[in-house]
Image (cartoon, rainbow, N blue to C red):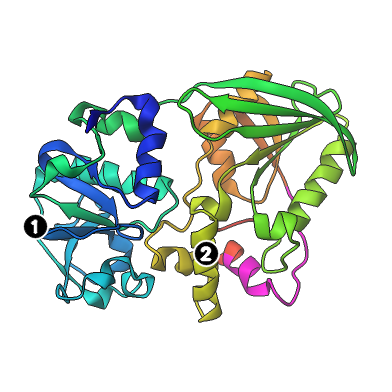
Amino acid sequence: MKEFHFSEKWAILAALRQGEWVSLGKWGAIAASETMKSMSVSPLRMLLPAVLFPQRDPSRLIGGSHYLVSPSLEENPSIYNDPQTLFDPDSWKIMPFLPSEEKPLATALSLVKEAALLPALIIDSGNPEKGVIHIPEEAFSELTHRHRNWMIAARAIIPVRHGQAELIAFRPDDGGPEQVALVFGKPTDNPLVRLHSECLTGDVFGSQRCDCGEQLNGAMQRLSEARQGGILLYLAQEGRGIGLVNKLRAYQLQDKGLDTFDANLRLGFGADERTYEAAAAMLKTLGFRKIDLLSNNPEKAKALMLHDIHVSMVSHAFPPNRHNESYLAAKSNRFKHLV
């Protein structure tokens, strides 16, 4: 087992995705419930988000948002990575936790979510040395709160449906995924900007379950025509930050009657897991601190303003179709979008 260095964060995410154990030192070893390959002879516990337990005692929360639980059917190990069981909080019973566990376990759960896995952790407190990689205590805060520096890695002119644009690729200094900006015209000091989170189903396949494809195409049209110049920031945070696989799971829950807000909660995620620090950093790198934001989402504007970007909102709405009426209603009623 080797010591952790921050540049190896993505190796940790890969280990969790591959079902390997990661050591938290004296707090034990952790594995992602969804992918865990092997059980242990020592007692196991599980960490799940509190959104799965809305009626439980809040005094047992870790950091206000997590529960330590144990399976009520410990003789059946398969429940640890059966999504149907993880979606059913009645399968679990609450266990006590130690206050000292809050930071390491909250960090570990954040890593599992960043790995785009279901936010459920198996904890082996009795065998801390079993991990393929070790995260020291001093790295816990940095792993989840470290500021990324973004640099331009490459740029090129590309012809698109709405004219020519410059595609600029940004790379973070922590080895994480790249982000891109598509720049139309010669932006002034107050350009029109669209923050668009990737949506494979809508942007590429033309799915009618959402309005993402329409929003993307409509935004590119308006950005290309804007006199002040236009910038599209295409952000790698599929499914409002929960990843493609979990978005498809949320679709399954929506088909059973939940709306897009509650489906994410039922999977253990927040309703919207997206962040916009990268978007703000990209705008600053390009030299812009004042923008007209093409969006109906006030939370995007608030997030950018927290990073010292001055924002004026410009409406960007499209009529519903028979497949996305309930989706757009949820965006308005539950997420408070201005549609």
Magenta stretch?
315-330
The reply, left or right, for residue 60 in relation to residue 233 is left
What's the residue at 61%, 56% (across, down)? Answer: 337
What's the residue at 56%, 58% (across, down)? Answer: 336
Q: Tag 2's secondary structure?
A: loop
Please say if 179 is above or below 207.
above
Quadrant hosting residue 169: top right
Q: Which residue is mark 2?
A: 334
Three-letter amino acid code at disc 1?
Answer: Ser
Q: Residue 319 in the image: state x and y as whole percent.
A: 78, 66
Can residue 287 be seen in this snapshot? yes
Q: Tag 1's secondary structure?
A: loop
Based on the picture, tell me whether residue 328 belongs to the magenta stretch: yes
Quadrant hosting residue 318: bottom right
Q: Residue 326 in the image: state x and y as whole percent.
A: 62, 74
Q: Which residue is mark 1?
A: 42
